């Protein structure tokens, strides 16, 4: 079966099956146009609605990507920032909607950036800008953005990203450490942004400076909580609080 037919079947299922995650004409047309097989090594996986791991980062299932894009609601000519370049697929779909010169993507992992650039070039989207950056810092030299999409979870929407939104701009991000909610943040008032939860999701945490995709511990919050717990346990049961039974009878040596 031709890949274009598989691509149409994929989008049809996202529109009409129980998922029903594609509702706008722009997202539908863009997903039908982007050759997803250029972003996925295995053609069999390219148009299957499933996620998988690649270089320590998760490649989103098409239904998840569609859900993010529908929440973001980009329009032609919008300036867009994608935090978490991944394999570049989401950036390519956005390029179909807003124009490739209007799409900027960042990722903290250099190998991921290289892969995304290569994939986008192979698929015909060389104009998409991809750079190696700490995603929480955004891309201030290209701000303000009409749309910012974060493909990783954070405890709260990073203030730096909120400040890089244009007036009436939209930031879409999974919010929460344990239970996460896909959240739309409006940029009308950076000091008191309006938020709108859109239902539960499960994303990997946003990496910070010094962390790389595929490392043993991705989540700085989890890591620091564990270290604090270990220090507290040592304070309670450390060697300085234990009697050493040198003679075997519970007495201390003279």
Image (spheres, grey):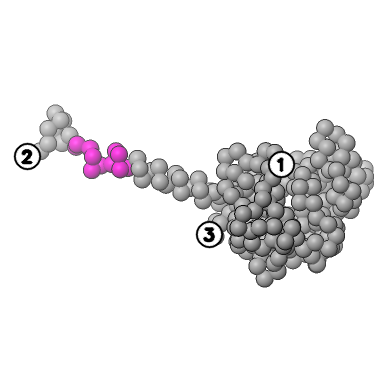
- As helix, strand or loop, the secondary structure at mark 1 comes to strand
In this view, the residue farthest toward the left is 254
Total marks shown come to 3
- The residue lying furthest to the bottom in this view is 141
**Vertical placement of residue 128 versus 181, above or below:** below
- In the image, taking residue 100 as reference, residue 188 lies left or right, namely left
- In terms of secondary structure, where does tag 3 sit? loop
Q: Please name the residue shown 70% across and 38% down the image.
A: 199
The numbered dot on residue 198 is: 1
**Which sits earlier in the primary sequence, circle 2 or circle 3?**
3
Name the residue rendered at 81%, 35% in the picture.
Answer: 19
Please say whether residue 139 is one of the residues in the magenta stretch: no
**Residues packed near mark 2 inside 10 Å, few (<14), some (14 to 19) or many (20 plus):** few
Q: Residue under label 3, please give it.
A: 210
Which quarter of the figure is the N terminus placed in?
top right
Numbered mark located on residue 27 in the image: none
Dot 3 or dot 1: first in sequence order is 1
Part of the protein shown in magenta: 234-244
Spatial CA span between label 2 and label 3? 51 Å
The reply to whether discs 3 and 1 touch (Cβ–Cβ < 8 Å) is: no
CA gap between label 3 and label 1 equals 31 Å
Asked whether residue 240 is drawn in magenta, I would say yes
Residue 24 picture location, percent across and down: 86, 47
Residue displayed at 36% across by 45% down: 231
**On the rendered image, what quadrant is the C terminus found in?**
top left
Q: Which residue is mark 2?
A: 254
Q: Nearest the camera: 84 or 180?
A: 180
- Please tell me which residue lies in front, 180 or 114: 180
Residue 148 x/y as whole percent:
71, 57
Q: Main secondary structure of the magenta part?
A: helix
Residue 161 lies in what quarter of the image? bottom right
Q: Residues within 10 Å of mark 3 (few under 14, many from 20)?
A: few
């Amino acid at each position: 079966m031709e890949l274009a037919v598989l691509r149409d079947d994929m989008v049809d299922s996202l529109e009409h099956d129980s998922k029903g995650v594609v509702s706008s004409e722009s997202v539908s047309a863009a997903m039908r146009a982007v050759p997803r097989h250029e972003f996925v090594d295995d053609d069999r996986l390219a148009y299957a609605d499933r996620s998988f791991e690649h270089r320590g980062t998760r490649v989103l299932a098409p239904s998840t990507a569609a859900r993010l894009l529908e929440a973001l609601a980009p329009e032609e000519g919008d300036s867009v920032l994608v935090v978490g370049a991944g394999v570049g697929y989401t950036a390519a779909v956005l390029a179909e909607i807003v124009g490739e010169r209007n799409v900027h993507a960042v990722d903290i992992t250099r190998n991921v950036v290289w892969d995304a650039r290569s994939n986008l070039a192979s698929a015909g989207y060389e104009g998409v800008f991809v750079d190696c950056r700490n995603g929480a810092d955004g891309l201030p030299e290209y701000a303000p953005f009409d749309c910012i999409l974060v493909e990783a979870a954070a405890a709260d929407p990073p203030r730096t990203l909120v400040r890089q939104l244009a007036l009436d701009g939209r930031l879409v991000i999974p919010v929460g450490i344990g239970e996460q909610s896909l959240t739309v943040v409006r940029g009308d008032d950076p000091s008191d942004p309006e938020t709108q939860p859109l239902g539960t999701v499960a994303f990997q945490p946003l990496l910070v400076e010094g962390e790389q995709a595929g490392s043993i511990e991705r989540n700085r919050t989890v890591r620091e909580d564990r270290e604090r717990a270990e220090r507290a346990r040592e304070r309670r049961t450390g060697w300085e609080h234990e009697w050493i039974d040198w003679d075997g009878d519970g007495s201390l040596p003279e």
